């Protein structure tokens, strides 16, 4: 595996964070195209203002209300997947990684990203896993009440990644009522605070996420 820099952007609009992502993504691509070595792998962490984002394969019909009516903004994005919500109380991670330096492909990268969140949830005695037909991290993944706690959507070019994951910690889940999350209408959405019945120490959970990524990717 390879080294990477962790950059905590704090609270930031989706648009401003996207500018930072794209700049880092393009810088790594330019270095690769010129055949130069680089140490630009970066893991951005951010908490967004309320926003709905639609993936390139998404269906706008999965947005059930006008975002402005619920105090949110809206962006079409270049990532995979359908529609999702980002907002306060949610840890969003954007790994801008050159996967060739990590010696892994896209499928393994997504698996490791999911695994990092699964490891964090183990710390809280929550059993989480995967559903074959749907990306992300799920609770009751083999049961009758599957619910997503972390969504994943990525873009890659020349094995350089952008976009990433959204982990619901203290998220206001009512925002998900206004969309068909990830285009899946027969499964629920949850958060760490909902599952444990109390508000979580957001910064402490964020440090657990960083530690899990370091353990799995470095």
Image (tube, grey):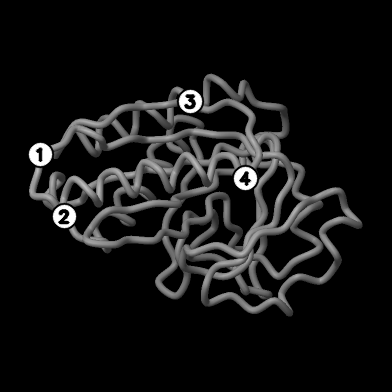
Q: Give how far across and how far down residue 170 sits, in percent.
A: 68, 35
> Crowding near pointer 3: few (<14 within 10 Å), some, many (20+)?
few
Residue drawn at x 29%, y 43% is: 27
Q: Which mark is residue 14?
A: 4
Q: Say what secondary structure mark 2 lies in.
A: helix
Q: Which mark is residue 194?
A: none
Contact between marks 2 and 3 (CB within 8 A): the answer is no
| Between marks 4 and 1 in the image, the one whose residue lies nearer the viewer | 1
Is tag 2's residue or tag 3's residue first in the polypeptide sequence? 3
Residue drawn at x 81%, y 63% is: 178
Is tag 4's residue or tag 1's residue first in the polypeptide sequence? 4
Pick the front one: 40 or 23: 23
Say above or below: 134 vs 48.
below
Residue position marked by numbered label 1 in the rendering:
37
Residue position marked by numbered label 2 in the rendering:
33
Q: Quadrant of residue 94?
A: top left
Q: Which mark is residue 8?
A: 3
Q: Say what secondary structure mark 3 lies in.
A: strand
Contact between marks 4 and 2 (CB within 8 A): the answer is no
Is tag 4's residue or tag 3's residue first in the polypeptide sequence? 3
Residue 105 left/right relative to 138: left
Q: Compute the Cα span from label 2 to label 3.
A: 28 Å
Q: Quadrant of residue 212?
A: top left
Q: Compute the Cα span from label 4 to label 1.
A: 30 Å
Say above or below: 69 vs 63.
above
Q: Compute the Cα span from label 2 to label 1.
A: 10 Å
Residue 180 left/right relative to 138: right
Q: Say what secondary structure mark 1 lies in.
A: loop
Q: Compute the Cα span from label 4 to label 3.
A: 14 Å
Q: Give how far across and how far down residue 81 sits, in percent.
A: 51, 69
Residue drawn at x 45%, y 64% is: 135
Q: Say what secondary structure mark 4 lies in.
A: helix
């Amino acid at each position: 595996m390879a080294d990477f820099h962790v950059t905590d952007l704090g609270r930031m609009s989706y648009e401003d964070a996207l500018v930072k992502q794209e700049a880092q993504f393009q810088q790594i691509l330019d270095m690769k195209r010129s055949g130069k070595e680089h140490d630009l792998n970066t893991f951005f962490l951010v908490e967004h203002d309320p926003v709905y984002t639609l993936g390139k394969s998404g269906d706008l019909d999965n947005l059930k209300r006008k975002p402005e009516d619920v105090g949110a903004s809206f962006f079409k994005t270049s990532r995979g997947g359908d529609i999702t919500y980002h907002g306060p109380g949610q840890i969003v991670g954007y790994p801008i990684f050159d996967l060739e330096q990590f010696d892994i492909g896209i499928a393994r990268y997504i698996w490791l990203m999911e695994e990092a969140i699964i490891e964090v949830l183990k710390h809280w005695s929550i059993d989480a896993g995967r559903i074959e037909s749907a990306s992300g991290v799920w609770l009751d993944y083999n049961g009758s009440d599957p619910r997503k706690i972390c969504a994943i959507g990525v873009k890659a070019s020349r094995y350089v990644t952008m976009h990433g994951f959204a982990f619901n910690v203290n998220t206001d889940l009512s925002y998900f009522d206004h969309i068909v999350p990830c285009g899946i209408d027969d499964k629920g959405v949850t958060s760490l605070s909902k599952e444990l019945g109390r508000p979580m120490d957001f910064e402490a959970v964020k440090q657990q996420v960083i530690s899990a990524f370091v353990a799995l990717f470095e």
